[in-house]
Amino acid sequence: MSSSRVVGRLVRSRRLFAALVLSAAFGSPPAAAAPEPLEPVFTWNAIGRVNVPHGFCTGTLVGSSEVLTAAHCLWSHRRGRLYDPEEVHFVAGWRRGQHVAHARAVAFRLAPDLAFDERGVPTRLETDWAVLRLERTLLDLDLLQPLPVGWPGGRPVAAPRAQLLGYAQDRPHLPVRLRPCPIEPGPGPAGLVLHGCVASQGLSGAPLLVPDGPAWSVVAVHLGSILLEGRRVGAAVPVRRSLPDMLFR
């Protein structure tokens, strides 16, 4: 490959990172569908807040003691490093001061090649995922069950009914749902999943969900929004159905 092509790819990659950083830091224009408050439903109890000392993101219980979120949510800008695991709390089903369960993290499992730049932004967006291992199991068959991870059937398909669920900065105490968030065909820049919902700060780490029979499956972790060919779209890191077992076996 010629040096000019390599430079061109690097420039486009940096522009993509910058666009995503601005979205995460300062919020975004209105979503394709207005966010709606999500009243208590058993299915959504697995989605909760990932609380850190100076803010929060969204996370999803994907195992008895594993929570999927975005890696950049764990970065302390004040310290220039990741938070210590014990400083991170997962609060499942947080709704107006009530919750279904909560626990501290005891470890992070991250992409092996995850690296942050001086702004605390992952240098490769496809590595911007994290799994928190909690201090105890949160599995409660009456109130809480983990959500399945990965594409039903094992491969991506058209998903016009995809939706995004999580906690936004302007509505921190009640989960909101954005729908529909149709997933665009084919991989986006850096192998990301592009979808039709642009979300505000706080929804980083939120699950992008597709129908899985009568239930829903997590197919990607929402990062923010990017400007692509003159339009703003949501960007998420795809995840595989084997993710929890692969990371914790």
Image: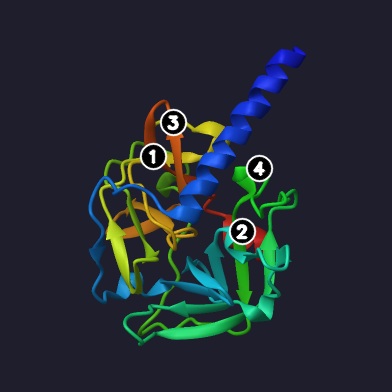
Q: Position of residue 127 (x, y in %)?
A: 64, 48
Amino acid type assigned to the residue bearing label 4 in the image: Arg
The residue carrying pointer 3 sits among few (fewer than 14), some (14 to 19) or many (20 or more) residues within 10 Å by Cα, namely some
Q: Do tag 1 and tag 3 residues touch (Cβ < 8 Å)?
A: yes
At 23% across and 54% down in the image, what residue appears? 34
At 51% across and 40% down in the image, what residue appears? 19
Q: Is residue 160 left or right of residue 108?
A: left
Query: Mark 4 or 3, which is nearer the eye?
Result: 3
Q: Position of residue 49 (x, y in %)?
A: 46, 73
Q: Which residue is mark 4?
A: 124
Circle count: 4
Q: Earlier in the sequence, mark 4 or mark 3?
A: 4
Q: Label 4 vs label 1: CA separation?
A: 18 Å
Amino acid type assigned to the residue bearing label 2 in the image: Ala
SS at circle 3: strand
Q: Earlier in the sequence, mark 1 or mark 3?
A: 3
Q: Which quadrant would residue 126 be assigned to in this image?
A: top right
Q: Do tag 4 and tag 3 residues touch (Cβ < 8 Å)?
A: no
Please give the label number shown on residue 233: 1
SS at circle 4: loop
Q: Which residue is mark 3?
A: 228
- Let me know if residue 222 appears in the view: no
Q: Do tag 4 and tag 1 residues touch (Cβ < 8 Å)?
A: no
Q: Which residue is mark 2?
A: 71
The residue carrying pointer 2 sits among few (fewer than 14), some (14 to 19) or many (20 or more) residues within 10 Å by Cα, namely many
- Is 12 in front, or is 114? 12
At 44% across and 31% down in the image, what residue appears? 228
Please give the label number shown on residue 216: none
